[in-house]
Image (spheres, helix red, strand yellow):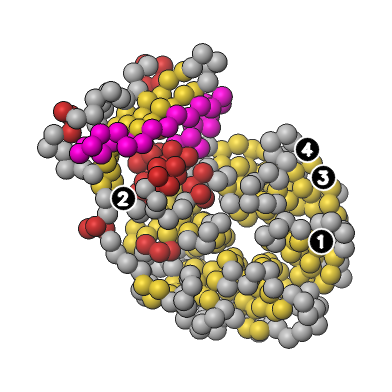
Amino acid sequence: MRIVAFSLFFAFTVGLFGDSTFEVIKRVANLPSIAVENTTEDKKYEELSTKFYRILINDFMVLTHFDVKDSNQRSTMEDEKGEFINRNVNYIMKFRLSGDSDKKLSCEVKIINPAVGTIYKNRYTIANEELHPFVAHKVVSDANHHFKMPEVDWLSKYVIFSRYTRPKHSEIVIADYTLTYTKTIVKNGLNLFPKWADSKQREFYFTKYENGTPVLHKMNPWNGTTERILETQGMLACSDVSKDGKNLLLTMAPNGQPDIFLYNVDTKKREALTKYKGIDVSGHFIENNKRITFVSDRLGYPNIFAKDISVPNGSVEQLVYYGKNNNSCSSYDSYIIYSSRETDNSFSSNTFNLHLISTETNFVRRLTATGVNQFPNFSSNGESVLFVKHYKEQSSLGIIRLNYNKSFLFPLNIGKIQSIDW
């Protein structure tokens, strides 16, 4: 696995939390330094421990909470003092992989402050070695919590996406955010638009075409059970789920043109929120589920609009005034990220950049500068964004750390992605 980091090019004031603006603070010089050391002794885990080390280093880099020392130094778990003489580092994380009596993978972790010794210990076990990336992510997330840094629960979340395998065939895959772990969970036929059903990622919705008809299913990927939700002619996709999991925003086209529908999971009732004689797609909840955003061609080109969810026939508000082809979006509370085409090349590739706006201000913040950037998705706390980047014949999965002016790319060699969620 290789990670690429680059600084983003955008203004340093933006609306995100609390007040309508905040300042991006560059604190690199003041970050506490941390080194990671592999103390694995069992030769059976030599190769795995090397991969594990690399994931830990990359995770700490993505956090942007530490000055990471990538020395690849080996040591023993027991030594704590003498080995740190003349080491210019604030903290050392040591880990050791081994097998326990039940043939499970065990990971012992401790963090050392050279001035005082061990300040943190933990142990992790996992039955399936293939899931070791999630153990590494959990190790870093727990260490981050120990230091009382801003939470990064998204680090160990599952990413779910649909990828095309051949014409009219696609499969649904779950992975960690670095794509070190991937597992196909739905195959055979055309399977599209996976969307997690809750924050705990116990189930997800997806659309499967059956004899040419789109059918919405809900699946538990951990036991394989699937529930049929509804079907309709034309188009059907679940684009968002309310915070309590009781309401879905669906794009449906029962009468030929797609509109946004609200579907209640308990009552099974659906209500049309838009009734435009054109294209309305990709609905997302905003402002504590009181309003929705969606993409529409009401101006003659795709753009981002919003409306009150409690007034089906109420007025529609244009949200974006920058760009002439704004074709996808994601939301968190009152904040929206959208993809906008910024070039118009007939015989070469075009540039699609991501932009961040707030419903409370007209400020626009550009998040990317080059390539084709698609499928933006906010993290559960709104501080990070997952997206897919295509640039110079290379596709990557990207993470934008909004508060830190940083973005990280992970090479994507898994086919063409249709949609993605985390």
For label 4, the SS is loop
| Amino acid type, callout 2 | Phe
Q: Which residue is drawn at 84% across and 47% down?
A: 228
For label 3, the SS is strand
> Against 148, is 283 above or below?
below
Answer yes or no: do the residues labelled 1 and 3 have beta carbons within 8 Å? Answer: no
> Against 412, is 392 above or below?
below
- Pointer 1: what residue? 264
Read off the magenta span.
111-136
Q: Nearer the viewer, mark 4 or mark 1?
A: 1
Left or right, 377 with reference to 312: left
For label 1, the SS is strand
| Amino acid type, callout 3 | Glu
Which x, y percent locates residue 179? 50, 42
Which x, y percent locates residue 186? 70, 40
Badge 1: few (under 14), some or many (20 or more) residues near its Cα, within 10 Å?
some
Instruction: Measure the C-alpha gap from mark 2 to mark 4.
Output: 42 Å
